[in-house]
Structure formats: C-alpha cells, structure tokens
Amino acid sequence: MITISGGITAPKGFKTAGIHCGVKDNFTTPQPDKLDLAMVLSEVPCTAAGTYTRNVVKADPVILSMQYLADGKAQGIIADSGNANACAPKGMENAIRMANAAAAATGLQPQDFAVCSTGIIGVELNIDAIEKGIPTLVSQLASDAASSDNAAHAIMTTDLKKKEIAVRTEIGGKTVTVGGIAKGSGMIHPNMGTMLCFVTTDCAIDGALLQSMLKEVVNKTFNRVTVDGDTSTNDTCIVLANGLAENPVITGPGADYDAFFEALRAVCEYEAKMIAGDGEGASHLLTCTVQGAATEEKAEFMAKAVVRSPLVKCAIYGADANWGRVLCAIGYSGAEFDPKAVEVKFRSQAGELLVCTGGQGVVFDENMATKVLSEEEVEVLVTLTEGQASCSCWGCDLTYDYVKINGDYRS
C-alpha cells in the first residue's frame, strides 16, 4: 500500500467540486472567498456505507442520509459548510430540497445522494443560496487534484488545515484506490467532533460487508479521537465504492478483505489524526498509547481518558511533565489495573523521557521534559504488565484560543 496524490478523486470514476454559494450570507458578513458547497459524484451507482453520530439530537441531514443510504446504494454526496441545519426551522424540508436540487442538476434521483451539513446549530439553512449554487457546482465537477482540494476546503468550518489523502493497494491482481476528505476541529468526541468524512474507492465489495467493515474501522479511528468531549449532532462518515477497479468482488474474509481493510483504515486513521491535531486553538497533537494491557478495550478506555482529560491537555499546552494527571486519568477511566505496575513516558521528536515507574515518580531532567513536550506532536506512553494488547487514541492540548473561538462561534 502506498500513499498517492489526488485525494477523493484519485479512485477511478469519481468527480468532485467545491464553490462559494453564500451559505452564511443570511446571518453574517459575506465571505466570498470561503468555499461552502461541495459535491462528490461517481460516474456509476455505488455500494454505499455510512456511520453517523450517536447523539440523540441528530441534524435533519443525518436523518435523511440514514434513510437514503439504508439500501446500501448511492451515487453522490452534497454537503454545505457554515450551517449545520440542526434543530433549525424547516430542517428536513431544506435537507430534502438539497437532495432534490442535486438530483435535478445531475439527472439522478434524490435518493442517490447523501446530504451533509456542518456549522452553526439552530439557524435556518440558506437553501435558496444552495439551490442557486448547485448548477454551478455541477458544472465544475472534475476528477483532478484541484477539484478534490476545493471540495476539502468547502467542507471546512473552523478547521485551519485541509484533511485529504489517497492510498493505493493491489487486490485480486487489480490496482485499487481509496481516497478521502474530512473536516473537524471542534465539538469533537465522535461516537458514530463536528466531523464529516467522505471516502471514495473503486474497489468492488459487497454492501453488507462494506458497512460492517466501516463500522469496525470507525471504531478504531474516529471513535478514538477527542478534542473537547462534545459529540456533534452532525457526525457522518460515508464510503462510496463504485467497483471500477474491476477486482473480484470482496464477499468475505481473506487476503483481499485484509488488504482493503488496511487501506480504508489508513485513510480514516490519517483523517482522525488530522482532526485531532487541528483541534480548535490547538498547538499540539496529543497521542496516548497504552500497551501491555490484557485487552484492547481496556487499553482504549485508558488511552481515551488521558487524551480527554482537561488537566492533561492543559499540561501539554504548558509543556509541563505532570505525569500525576496521566495516572489520575487512567484511574478514573473505568479500567481495572494495578497502579503499582504502571510506567509512564513522554515522547516526541526531541526524545523520550521516563517520568513514572511502578506507579511512582522518578527523577528526570525538567529541561529535557520541556523540550520533549514543546514539539508539535507529543505522545504519552503508558505501559502495563498484563498482556499484549495496545491502543492509541488522539487528541490535542487545551489553549486560550479554544475559549476565544467558541466564545464567539456564532459571529
């Protein structure tokens, strides 16, 4: 498996585009340079799979997409940024109008589209601007890297970094490509943080198998990310597989299944880490890896507790090697373990530092600790002595800017 350029248009038969249509112009100062409407379209019908927010309060586009993709089929995605169309007047009506407009402009049926929205909650969607913009959007659909770039930017809200990747592997003697774009920066604690991820592939795979595989991959990637502990109303991850690679259809376990699983996981894990590192106001990507656990589930509980801890996040921001906060977090994680058999290290490109062994602190070089924790990517490594299981979860530090961004989000 190799990483390639091209993003979501790298797989055969997919086109995309992103434009400005003025989604937020009805309640804020117009930003004509902000792309805010995106479409992903396959030349042929696709096997489709989706995972969605577990928040009881679901945005109407999420509910509609769940309905439209229930048969495991789709051909495109229409998405806006700037307005979540959640808990908003005429929410379902406007979500349906988005699908209808996409269908009318492409000659397809509304049910061929997943509908996604992200942005402010509780404000009526500027559907007139979207309907007016969709024909222009469709006219700009293309399969080049620039179009994937535009679509990746068009789904961003408070994101500072584009999140885009493509990988290529061989399945059944054929070259198979998986590409993806994602957005997410705040309200991130996926339980499928506001996050969207669109994945395309030319792989031929059974629909039910793709759905179960996506669920497993999401659990091992996006559901191991937390920025602020808030699960969005709009979280959605959708995979479209059009089969144009002409590989033998994957119908069950085996070498082909494993190869595609790893490609899909690679795309989703990359996007998950990008979301964590681009958390609102973040200055560090924080990874916690727990190893030597009896089960992967236990390791996940502990690792997620560390990256979710506000006190750990503040310590990482301040480059403070406060290992006691790490022990505190794993202690309330819900996992049973022997506190006297825990080792903690901090690690980054600047080096690795042992700060706790046998559940107690050790003398360490504070200057070295500051160097290690000042790097952009920092890892907390927790080692147990129970077994061979391990898990990594991802988050970010907690900065003053997070409060500033969310203190005036609606403006």
Image (spheres, rainbow, N blue to C red):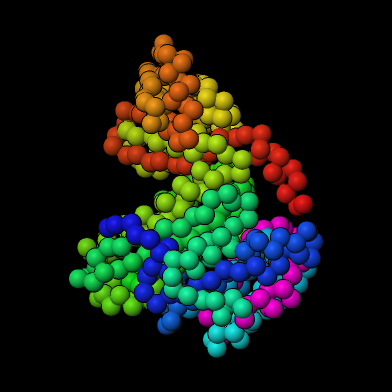
Instruction: Kindly identify the residue that appears in the image at 57 percent across and 25 percent down.
Output: 318
Where is residue 95 drawn, in percent x and y? 66, 73
Where is residue 237 drawn, in percent x and y? 50, 62
248 displayed left or right of 177: left
Q: Is residue 121 magenta?
A: yes
Residue 322 appears in the picture as rendered? yes
Instruction: Kindly identify the residue that appears in the image at 59 percent across and 84 percent down.
Output: 105
Where is residue 314 drawn, in percent x and y? 59, 29
75 lies above or below 291? below
Which range of residues does the magenta coloring cover? 109-135
Place residue 99 in its image quadrant.
bottom right
Instruction: Kindly identify the residue that appears in the image at 24 percent across and 65 percent down.
Output: 170
Q: Is residue 337 magenta?
A: no
Place residue 397 in its image quadrant.
top right
387 lies above or below 192? above
Residue 205 appears in the picture as rendered? no
218 displayed left or right of 86: left
